[in-house]
Structure formats: structure tokens, C-alpha cells
Image (cartoon, grey):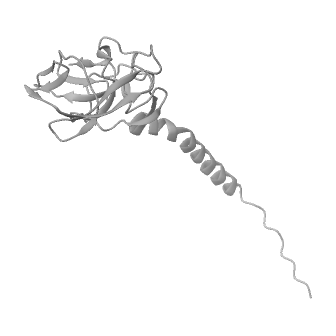
Amino acid sequence: MTFTQAASPRSPWNRVWLGVVGVILLILLVSSPIFVRTFLFQPFSAPSGSMSPTLQQGDSFFVSKCAYGYSHFSLPFSPPLFSGRIFGSEPARGDVVVFRLPKNTSTDYVKRVVGLPGDRIQMKQGLLTINGTPVQRERLVDFIGGDLCGSDPAARVKHWRETLPNGVSHEGVRARSDGSTFTQATGRALMRCSTSWS
């Protein structure tokens, strides 16, 4: 004797649930990159060699968006929905930060923080001083591969390791300050790469 089982017709609810699950998965797939880029990490590329040797021109890197809080620049297309920062915190000396200047919000800057609010930053005979105290530095092998202005691809540039007051050390920095937080390009010869903002 042979038993055959009749195929049961599929319930229309099975198709509805399958469709709902499919739509939810599609929404998650499409919105995940937008969520990650808006609230967690954003890709950047170093546009110049001003942070050399820390970042070379063309290097790609990700920036944590929650490290110092969120501003309207954290959102896609930077709509001015609010001012200031939400969940903001101060950077520490030695941090490499990406920011926009209040005067020019179309350009992203990549710099290292060397001065904090209340600090007095000076360059004395080529030596960075913070609050009147020279930053410790040691001479390294000259950096070969072009001057930092890009005019001589075989130039030798003095290479230093500097240690900030909080113990963070990095290779090279130089510039000026007239604001609350002071950042510098790693490239010693590029005075114009340093930035201060309030």
C-alpha cells in the first residue's frame, strides 16, 4: 500500500510574513551604512602631507564620531539643525582630530592637539613651549622623501620625537596659536597647517 500526502496549500499569511521580513531586512541593509557613518565612524583621506610622517598624503582612515560628541557636521550634508555639541568632551593633548573651522565649514582639517583651553603655546627658537615649559624632544634620523611644501622630492627634513606634558609622544609639530584649543600639523615646515579655534 502506498501512502501519498496531499500538498497543503500555502496560507496567504505565510506570504505576508515573508514579505514583511524581507522589507525589514532590506531597510536594515540600506540604513546600516547611513547609521554607522552618521553616529559611529566616518572615512577620511589625508589630502596633503601636512601630517607626515603620521599620515601620508592619500592615506585613508576612519574617525570615531562619538569621541568628542556630535555637532551638526556629524550629520550627512551638515544641516544646521542645532548649534554646539551634544555629548561633547574635550580632546586630550596628542589626539589627532578632524574638524572644521567656524570661518570655513567646507574644509575638513586633520591635526594633532597640543594645546588645551587656558594653555599658552609658543615657538621659541624652533622649540614648542606649553605654558612656558619647553616640550621634550629627541632628534631622529632625517625624514627623506620631500620637503613638506612639495618643492623638492629628495629633500632631507629634520625629524623629531616630541613628548607632550601628558606623556604622549609623536614625531614632529610646529606653529602658532590664538584660540582655545590648539592643533598642529605634524609637518614641521608647514606653519600654515596649524590651526586654532574657539
Residue 165 image point, x, y percent:
14, 36
Left-right relation of 159 to 26: left
Q: Residue furthest right?
A: 1
19 and 61: which one is in front?
61
- Residue 110 visible in the shown view: no
167 and 98: which one is in front?
167
The answer to which image quadrant residue 179 occupies is top left
30 and 143: which one is in front?
143
Residue 120 image point, x, y percent:
11, 22
Left-right relation of 83 to 133: right
Indicate the quadrant containing the C terminus: top left, top right, bottom left or bottom right: top left
The answer to whether residue 66 is above or below residue 174 is: below
Left-right relation of 82 to 10: left
The answer to whether residue 13 is above or below residue 103 is: below
Indicate the quadrant containing the N terminus: top left, top right, bottom left or bottom right: bottom right
Residue at (16, 31) in percent of width and height? 135
The answer to whether residue 14 is above or below residue 158 is: below
2 and 50: which one is in front?
50
For the image, the number of numbered tags is 0
Residue at (42, 20) in percent of width and height? 155
Residue 122 image point, x, y percent:
14, 19
The answer to whether residue 170 is above or below residue 189 is: below
Q: Residue furthest bottom?
A: 1
Residue at (30, 11) in percent of width and height? 103
- Residue 25 visible in the shown view: yes
Residue at (34, 22) in percent of width and height? 81
Residue 192 image point, x, y percent:
31, 13
